[in-house]
């Protein structure tokens, strides 16, 4: 039984999401993620200018008239939403936590996918695979995924992206769209990510919060790591401390972007406190022009 408050939240997201899909993301999703290939559609009579290589000789011989084969893009695909629900996903200093933003992004993409007749699956991970829902189609299925995104209680607070990627390689055989929503505060996942990107159309959606890249001058502040349980006392009134913190964050971000380029994974950054619609739509439009 879904709690009334959670049901109301899911319903609000569904209403907002459907508006975004109809007005913004429906066509963008279709253009950004091409079909798997070209499949035969039908035959029609030959017309002047048709490529003779497309002539269907069997039908032509049987009917006595020249017919050509018509092909179209094979559109039905599978979208796998891979979502980080480690301890850092429950962090956010601007309106919403990362996990809430991830759920809304996944709702938009899930409804865009089923509008395109695609199947949608879900993988939630921390330092283990927390939940895997095999891909299916339909509105009720997407609503179930949104419920899981909000309601699932993580069994662990750590992060291990490699475990999630290894699971994808084992269970998703058919070429799919793999969309990873995470803050990517992890290490040693380059090799499995490269393997996933070779097999699947892979996109990294990085969630960031302003307080992860800069500190205000507030005097002595205790920083708590929700994934390790460790805490650290910092004197934020010190310019040197704030500069060191910002440089460490900048270096980590640069290393992630470099890694994603090496393994050829497309990347979009979503900032907590800012609407995800514009950067996501811009990313889709840019991707559609390249692919």
Image (tube, rainbow, N blue to C red):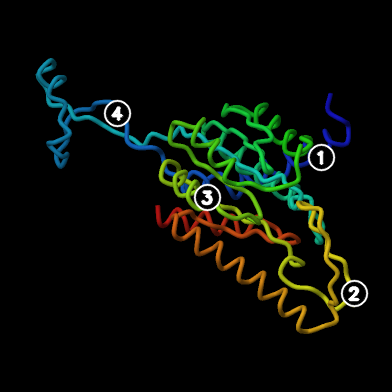
Viewer-nearest residue: 215 or 12: 215
For mark 1, give the secondary structure. helix
The residue beneath circle 4 is 40
Pair 4/1: label in front:
1
The residue beneath circle 2 is 220
**Between disc 3 and disc 2, whose residue precedes?**
3
Q: Is residue 224 above or below residue 77?
A: below
For mark 2, give the secondary structure. strand
The residue beneath circle 3 is 203
**Between disc 3 and disc 1, whose residue precedes?**
1
The residue beneath circle 1 is 9
Pair 3/1: label in front:
3
**Between disc 2 and disc 1, whose residue precedes?**
1
Pair 4/2: label in front:
2
Left or right position of 170 against 247: left
**Between disc 4 and disc 3, whose residue precedes?**
4
CB-based contact (under 8 Å), mark 3 and mark 1:
no
* Residue at the image position 38 percent from the left and 34 percent from the top: 74
Gap in angstroms between the C-alphas marked 4 and 2: 68 Å
- Residue 263, horizontal then vertical, whole percent: 45, 55
């Amino acid at each position: 039984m879904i709690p009334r408050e959670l049901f109301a939240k899911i319903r609000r997201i569904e209403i907002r999401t459907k508006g975004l899909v109809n007005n913004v993301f429906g066509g963008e999703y279709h253009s950004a993620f091409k079909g798997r290939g070209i499949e035969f559609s039908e035959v029609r009579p030959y017309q002047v200018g048709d490529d003779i290589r497309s002539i269907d000789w069997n039908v032509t011989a049987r009917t006595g008239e020249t017919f050509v084969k018509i092909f179209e893009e094979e559109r039905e695909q599978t979208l796998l939403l891979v979502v980080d629900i480690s301890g850092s996903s429950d962090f956010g200093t601007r309106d919403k936590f990362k996990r809430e933003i991830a759920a809304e992004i996944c709702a938009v993409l899930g409804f865009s996918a089923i509008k395109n007749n695609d199947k949608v699956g879900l993988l939630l991970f921390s330092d283990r695979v927390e939940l895997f829902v095999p891909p299916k189609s339909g509105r009720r299925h997407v609503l179930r995924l949104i419920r899981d995104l909000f309601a699932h209680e993580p069994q662990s607070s750590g992060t291990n992206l490699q475990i999630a990627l290894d699971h994808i390689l084992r269970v998703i055989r058919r070429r799919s769209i793999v969309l990873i929503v995470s803050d990517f505060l992890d290490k040693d996942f380059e090799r499995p990510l490269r393997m996933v990107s070779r097999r699947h159309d892979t996109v990294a959606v990085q969630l960031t919060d302003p307080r992860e890249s800069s500190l205000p001058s507030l005097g002595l502040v205790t920083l708590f790591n929700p994934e390790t349980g460790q805490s650290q006392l910092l004197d934020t009134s010190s310019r040197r401390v704030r500069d060191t913190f910002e440089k460490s964050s900048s270096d980590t971000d640069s290393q992630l972007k470099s890694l994603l380029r090496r393994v050829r994974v497309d990347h979009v950054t979503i900032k907590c406190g800012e609407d995800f619609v514009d950067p996501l739509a811009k990313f889709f439009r840019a991707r559609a022009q390249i692919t």
